[in-house]
Amino acid sequence: MQLIDPKEIDAYLAGFFPDNPRGAELLQLTLALALRKRPENMEELRDLPDNAPEWLRNKWPEGGPYYRFKPDAGLDDTVRHIADWIGAALLDNDEWLSKVDEQKRPKKLLKIGSLEVAIHEANKAMALKNQKLALTLGVNAGNATVVEKFDHGYTMVQLRTPEELDYESVKMGHCIGQGKYDEKLISGSHVYYSLRDGFNKPHATLGVDVASNALLQCRGAQNKPPVRQYMPFVQKFVKANHYKLTEGASHTGLIEQDGEYYDINNLPEGLKWRGNLDLHGCTSLTHLGDHITVSGNLDLRGCSYLAHLGNHISVGRDLNLYVCKSLTHLGNHISVGRDLNLYVCKSLTHLGNRISVGRNLNLEDCNSLTHLGNHISVGSSHSVIVLRNCTSVTHLPDNLSVYGLDLGGCTSFKNLPKRLNVRGDLYADATGITEIPEDAQIGGKICGLEEKRKRLGWKPDQKPEAIKRTLLPEAIKRILNTGPQRRGRDRGDD
């Protein structure tokens, strides 16, 4: 992937160790290369940025696609977890830090080639440290000070000493007690809380920045979101203290705007959200509601129980619904200003009625999809529809007009719609298409029909005039001598 500024990743990672250059260096060594290969956190450039480097200005738009690093709350959580592991290792001077190569780089970190491997190493190390911590805890380590009482015997306690952090770490299986947070606790810059049941068992750990009154972290066991049954207690505490939310909605069940909190599972009808709304990974979310407007991007990636959005949803920029495995349809009257991305939504059967997409529609690997729906509008001069590997899709609406259309791998698709207009390339490899209608207009290449051409008697050294014309209309005979085409996709912007 052509990243226009790899230093963005280095700066991002250094931000997890603002006062520790060695920690920043080790985190960069661990993750910089892995993040450069991570498509989930790359944004493809549609326009030349105002601050584009000179080399890009000289090449644009040739040689692309080009990407910019785009971290999100989910990546922040993961990297923070790995940074905690490295920070604890530095505090304890772990043995692996001394086993280095000729450039003084720890060999252990050089073996980490992906984010997933780094997470595994962090989890393994933290589990071992917690086992050792458990042997050192005093009998009163769990007796933290109660600051608020809830129904059914639940309490919120404040963790005031490093030993209380250690107890929390051991019981919850995360890293708050392995030394990394001791300095912040002692200095008073951060305060830490624990939700306990009537038997003093922890169920959620909260970290708050005192100066900004911001909730930085809210974690359940093993750094996962707290179990849903404990969320009401967490939410009541957050609202009572008027915390600014920097922790993701997946861990609190809340979003906040202008000092007002909203439960993501009960969003009010008519909600108007300014800017981006990040609900990715909110596994408790089953639907949004009706008449909701988001002026920026709406991120619903990984909302595994989301069945539909609702009706009359308006998104000003991108709507991202990657890997929403329970999603069956969107709803009716959905408007998306830019891209609608529905990668690998395996239960999706159709979109809904009256869906408007300003730029690109990506439905790759939605293999239960049979059709798009009625009154679907995909409208810009460079819009692309990607239906690759949608093995159940059988037809598209008539009068469809797009810049590019990818039907590759749509094995049930046999007939193109009436009056199809594709201004760029049409990808039709591994489909049931046997002919192009005479009323179709294809402005670019038709890719993936080579085997069908051969069955009609085409040979590579023949001139276009000698080829039988039953497969393609007169308007696109000129492409018959192009030979096998690349499988990549042309993407554009308006």
Image (cartoon, helix red, strand yellow):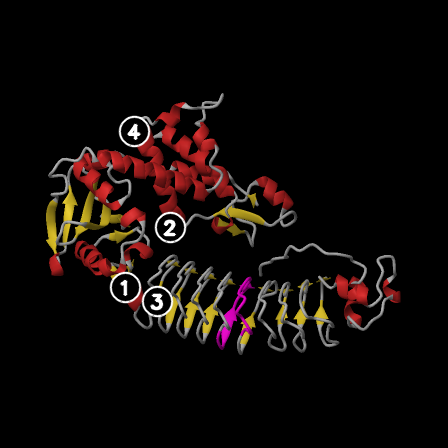
| Residue found 43% across the figure and 38% down from its top | 11
Picture quadrant where residue 267 is located? bottom left
Query: Which quarter of the rendering shows the C terminus?
Result: bottom right
Q: Earlier in the sequence, mark 2 or mark 3?
A: 2
Labelled disc at residue 73: 2
Q: Position of residue 3 (x, y in %)?
A: 54, 43
Picture quadrant where residue 294 is located? bottom left
User: Which residues, given as a range, are shown in magenta?
Assistant: 352-372
User: Contact (CB < 8 A) between labels 1 and 4?
Assistant: no
Q: Position of residue 44 (x, y in %)?
A: 54, 52
Q: Earlier in the sequence, mark 4 or mark 3?
A: 4
SS for tag 2? helix
**Residue 361 magenta-highlighted:** yes
For disc 1, the marked residue is 263
For disc 3, the marked residue is 272
Q: Earlier in the sequence, mark 1 or mark 3?
A: 1
Work out how far the residue at label 1 is from the one at label 4, CA to CA, in angstroms.
39 Å
SS for tag 4? helix
Say which amino acid is labelled 2: Ala
